[in-house]
Amino acid sequence: MRALYVAGDGEHAVLRERLQGILSIPVHGLDPFAGVERLEMAPETPRGGFTGAVGLLHAQAQRDGLPVNFLQPREPKPPSNVNQIATIAAATLAGVCLLGVLFWLASSSLADTQRQITKLTQKKAALATQITQLDSESKTLKGVKDWQKTAIPWHDELFNLTATFPDLKKHKLIRLEAREVPSRNNKDKYVALLTLKGEMPKDDRSQADELLAELARDRHYRLLEPTVDLPNGKFTATLAVERQDPSEYTRQMTAAAASGKGPLGGGSNKGGKMGGKGAMPKKGQEEDEP
């Protein structure tokens, strides 16, 4: 302790001297109103008696307030409700669990949706691949169909020509040229040219003329530039060929035509194509020569 303050101004001067002598430390007077200019009090008023009140007011003015406030003492807190705390804790726990369940359901639904999106994406890619393949196949099929519109069944044509040809002992086919002609438009029905060059007897042109007439009567032919050169024993014919279905080749080859003995092969307009119903008669069947 470095110094001692005694409340009062000059009324305790003797006491301050005695205390300073006993304690051997400075003893000062404490005037609670020191520094106050406008204060009217009687000279004999003991100023030290106001020290406690002034100190209390000073402490009250501080931010922390009085350590002990007798005017506003602390009231005891009511005891806490244990059941209410347990209820709040249970409700909080239930809320947390509910949030966890909702989060799990949302995560599962999102995962299922993502899997469905992945499957649909893969299915879309597979369908796109199939569409590309089908488009390519469709173009190929269209090309085949376009080709079939102009394709000539040449084996049926050769059979038809063979069944129509005259007596093979007197007539010979020395050249046969066939070629397809690209169609310029869809209205062109003749899609191929067939050129015949043959030899015949120099003294008989009847069967050559009949061959050309027979070819001219055929509805899927158009006879172009037929010639019969009797002095040289030659004949030629160019045919514009219209495509027809194989089932429309109905000419038959008779036994006489197959042996080369009959004129025009003895053919008729009934029967099927080569190897079918109108094929050569079997051994043992008799057929009159014309």
Image (cartoon, helix red, strand yellow):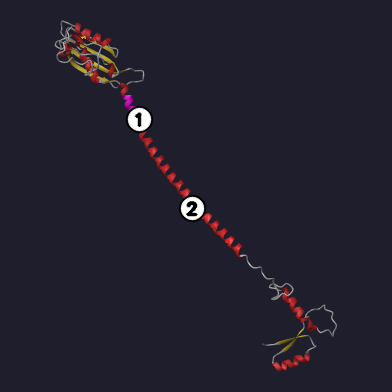
| Residue at position x 31%, y 23% in the image | 148
Q: Can I make out residue 171 in this image?
A: no
Q: Main secondary structure of the magenta part?
A: helix
Ranked by sequence position, the earlier of labels 2 and 1 is 2
- Magenta range is 136-147
Quadrant position of the N terminus in the picture: bottom right
Q: Nearer the viewer, residue 277 or 164?
A: 277
Splitting the image into 4 quarters, where does residue 183 fall? top left
| Residue 281 image label | none
Splitting the image into 4 quarters, where does residue 150 fall? top left
Residues at marks 2 and 1, CA–CA distance in whole angstroms: 52 Å
| Residue at position x 77%, y 79% in the image | 53
Quadrant position of the C terminus in the picture: top left
Q: How many marks?
A: 2
Q: Can I make out residue 59 in this image?
A: yes
- Residue indicated by mark 1: 139
Q: Amino acid at mark 1?
A: Lys
Find numbered disc 1 in the image and state the secondary structure of the residue it sits on. helix
Q: Nearer the viewer, residue 65 or 77?
A: 77
Vertical position of residue 62 compared to residue 199: above or below? below
Between tags 2 and 1, which lies in front? 2
- Residue indicated by mark 2: 104
